[in-house]
Image (cartoon, rainbow, N blue to C red):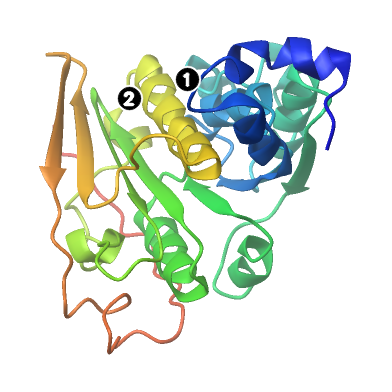
Amino acid sequence: MAFTNEQLERYSRHIILKDVGVKGQKKLLEGKVLIIGAGGLGAPAAMYLAAAGVGTIGIADADNVDLSNLQRQVIHTTPDIGKPKVESAKETMQAINPDVNVITYKEFIYSSNIMDIIRDYDFVLDGTDNFPAKFLINDACVMAKIPFCHAGIIRFEGQLMTWVPESDVPCYRCVFKEPPPKDAVPTCRQAGVIGAMAGIIGCLQAMEAIKYLTGAGELLTGKLLIYDALTNDFRKAKIPKDRNCGVCSDNPSITKLIDYEQAACELKK
């Protein structure tokens, strides 16, 4: 493909990078990334992937924009309240970059539809805020051999890791075997989250997708990156592959996708 003069100007700061260049920018324009969740994590990730020129970006979310979202979900604005998040996100992304083809899925992700949605994408970002969705995304991506980046945020902390279909790379289940029981872990709705945390971790997810598509740098495979905003500390925890993992081992015990129920957590005052 040949760049237009407008594209050469738009992506000039990428093209002059030795690790991206013309070839890398072409890979971005030909790339397909799916973002599951148009909330705190998905919002900054979607905006930066659109700005980077990722050619096709899917975004899946069943919710509408709520006033309480605007403290961290920067892809939406006050006039968007009541609008489907995927439509609000699409409008912002295409306003940033008309080159981008945005495909919307205004639906919840279940075992019955996730395979049909993820199969057309090169990379998946998990921008969800609940454990059933996170385990479902992990299991589906591992079974379909589609690389993905997991992330989670709560209060002043965030974490992320990346999985690719290689034999020695641990998946999310290698670290977290099963969804936590009731009252073990609160959600952001219950415990709160500082808004800028979503921006930091969501941007790091976008960076993982960009690195995967261009081949630049090293991905967060075999590592869990943990960020503490109160101390401004980043640390990487090495993650060993679980040879008996239920989904990514040589002899998996989980061969069908599971729709877990979200366990409620009652915070004690």
Picture quarter with the N terminus: top right
Crowdedness near tag 1: few (<14), some (14–19) or many (≥20) residues, C-alpha within 10 Å: many
Q: Residue at 60% of width from left, 34% of height from top? A: 24
Q: How many marks?
A: 2
Q: Residue at 30% of width from left, 86% of height from top? A: 252
Q: Is residue 233 left or right of residue 252?
A: left
Picture quarter with the C terminus: top left
Question: As shown in the figure, which amino acid type bears the numbered disc 1?
Answer: Arg
Q: Position of residue 64 (x, y in %)?
A: 67, 36
Question: As shown in the figure, which amino acid type bears the numbered disc 2?
Answer: Val
The residue labelled by disc 1 is: 72
Q: Position of residue 101 (x, y in %)?
A: 80, 39
Q: Name the one closer to the observer, 24 or 52.
A: 24
Q: Is residue 241 left or right of residue 121?
A: left
Q: Name the one closer to the observer, 198 or 95.
A: 95
Q: Is residue 66 visible?
A: no
Place residue 200 in its image quadrant: top left
Q: Position of residue 15 (x, y in %)?
A: 62, 19
The residue labelled by disc 2 is: 193
